[in-house]
Amino acid sequence: MAAEIWEIVFMFIKAFAVGGTICLIAQIIINITDLTAGKILVYFMLAGVVLTAFGAYQPLVDFAGAGATVPISGFGYLLANGAIKGAERGFFYAVTGALSAASAGVTAAVVFSFLAALLFKAHTKPN
C-alpha cells in the first residue's frame, strides 16, 4: 500500500516538474521579449506539433503524463498525433484525424464557456 502511494506521489512530482518547466520557459520568454501572449501560445502549440513530428514529445508524455499534455504544447501534440494516426489511413483522414482527436477538448471548452457566460455577468476590469 505504501509503495502505491509513493508511486502516485512520484507521478505528481514528475507532472509538476515538466508542466512547471514548460510554464517557466513561457514566463522567461514573456519577460525577455516583446512577444504578445497570443504569439507565445501559437509558438508553444507549434513546438508541440514539431516535437511530435520528430518523435520527441511522446517520451515526455510517457514520462510526465498530464504535465506534458495539459499545457498548450500538449494541444499541438494532440493535433499532430491525430493527424499522424489518420495519415495511416489516407490523406483525408490525416486532416480529419487531427480534428477528431481534438474535438472532445474543443467541445468541452465551448460548452463550459457558454455555461460560464450564462452564470456570470461580463464586465471590464477597472484600470
Image (cartoon, rainbow, N blue to C red):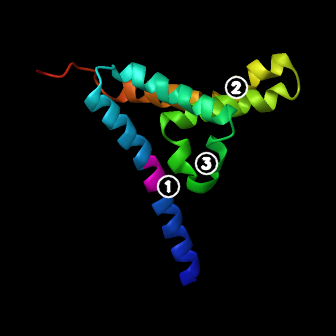
Mark 1–mark 2 distance (CA, rounded to whole Å): 24 Å
Query: Magenta segment range?
Result: 15-19
| Label 3 vs 1, first from the N-terminus | 1
Mark 2–mark 3 distance (CA, rounded to whole Å): 18 Å
Q: Residues within 10 Å of mark 1 (few under 14, many from 20)?
A: many
User: What is the three-letter code of the residue carrying label 2?
Assistant: Ala
- At mark 1, the secondary structure is helix
- At mark 2, the secondary structure is helix
Residue assigned mark 2: 98
Q: Is residue 106 left or right of residue 92?
A: left
User: What is the three-letter code of the residue carrying label 1?
Assistant: Ala
Q: Quadrant where the N terminus lies?
A: bottom right
- Percent from the top left, x then y, of residue 92? 82, 16
Magenta-drawn stretch contains 14:
no
Q: Quick one: which residue is furthest to the bottom in this view?
A: 1
Q: Is residue 45 left or right of residue 125?
A: right
Q: Quadrant where the C terminus lies?
A: top left
Q: Residue at x 82, y 25 (%)?
A: 87
Residue assigned mark 1: 15
Q: Residue at x 48, y 24 (%)?
A: 43
Secondary structure, magenta segment, majority class: helix
- Percent from the top left, x then y, of residue 41? 44, 26
Q: Is residue 3 left or right of residue 20?
A: right
Residue 104 appears in view: no
| Label 1 vs 2, first from the N-terminus | 1
| Label 2 vs 3, first from the N-terminus | 3
Residue assigned mark 3: 61
